[in-house]
Image (cartoon, rainbow, N blue to C red):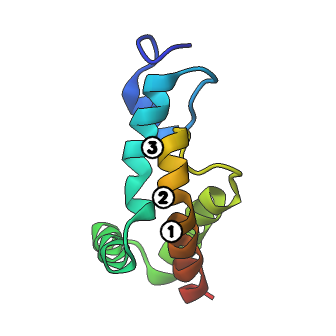
Amino acid sequence: MSFTTRPARTMTRTHDVQHGDRLGAILISIDLSILGAEPARYDAYAAAIRQEFIHVPDADYRAGRARVLGQFAARPVIFPDPAFAARYDGQARENLARELAAFR
């Protein structure tokens, strides 16, 4: 299924891109780009996400957030667009590892 026939909101919810879907790969890579931000910016983003889910008890939030971050960290490629992957993958993995370590 191509980007033109698959709703963008589904793509940004699942972060899955069909093979050969160049526009979808760019869209998802842009959506995930915060993961590869400089540490201070990423930490501010992570703090904002916690505030967005402040109604969730801390233990539940930590477990859920760790699960989501772990899924991204386990992917062989975080950013489906090769240019994004080349530029941001290393920093994204450092950011994910740092936040995950804080939950342990």
Type of amino acid under label 2 = Tyr
- In this view, the residue in front, 57 or 85, is 85
**Residue 67 lies in quadrant:** bottom right
Residue 8 appears in the figure: yes
Q: How far apart in space, not on screen, are marks 1 and 2 (Cα)?
A: 6 Å
Task: Give the mark nearer the N terminus: 1 vs 3.
Answer: 3
Position of 6 relative to 66 (above/below): above
Between the C-alphas of marks 1 and 3, the distance is 14 Å
Q: Residue at position x 41%, y 12% from top?
A: 4
Q: Are marks 1 and 3 in contact (CB under 8 Å)?
A: no
Determine the residue positioned at 44% across, 62% down.
35
Quarter of the rendering occupied by the C terminus: bottom right
Query: Given this view, does label 3 or label 2 mark the residue nearer the observer?
Result: 2
Residue denoted by label 3: 29
**What's under tag 3, amino acid-wise?**
Ser
First in sequence: mark 3 or mark 2? 3
Relative image position of residue 44 (x, y in whole percent):
29, 76
Local crowd size for mark 2, using a 10 Å CA cut-off: few (<14), some (14–19), many (≥20): many
Amino acid at pointer 1: Gln
Task: Give the residue pinned by disc 2.
Answer: 88
Viewer-closest of 15 and 90: 90
Residue 36 x/y as whole percent: 44, 62
Q: Secondary structure at mark 3?
A: helix
Rounded to the nearest angstrom, the CA distance separating label 3 from label 2 is 10 Å
Label 1: how many Cα within 10 Å (few below 14, some 14–19, many 20+):
some
**Do tag 1 and tag 2 residues touch (Cβ < 8 Å)?**
yes
Helix or strand or loop: what does disc 1 sit on?
helix
Badge number at residue 91: 1
Q: Is residue 53 left or right of residue 96?
A: left
Q: Tell me the element at label 2.
A: helix
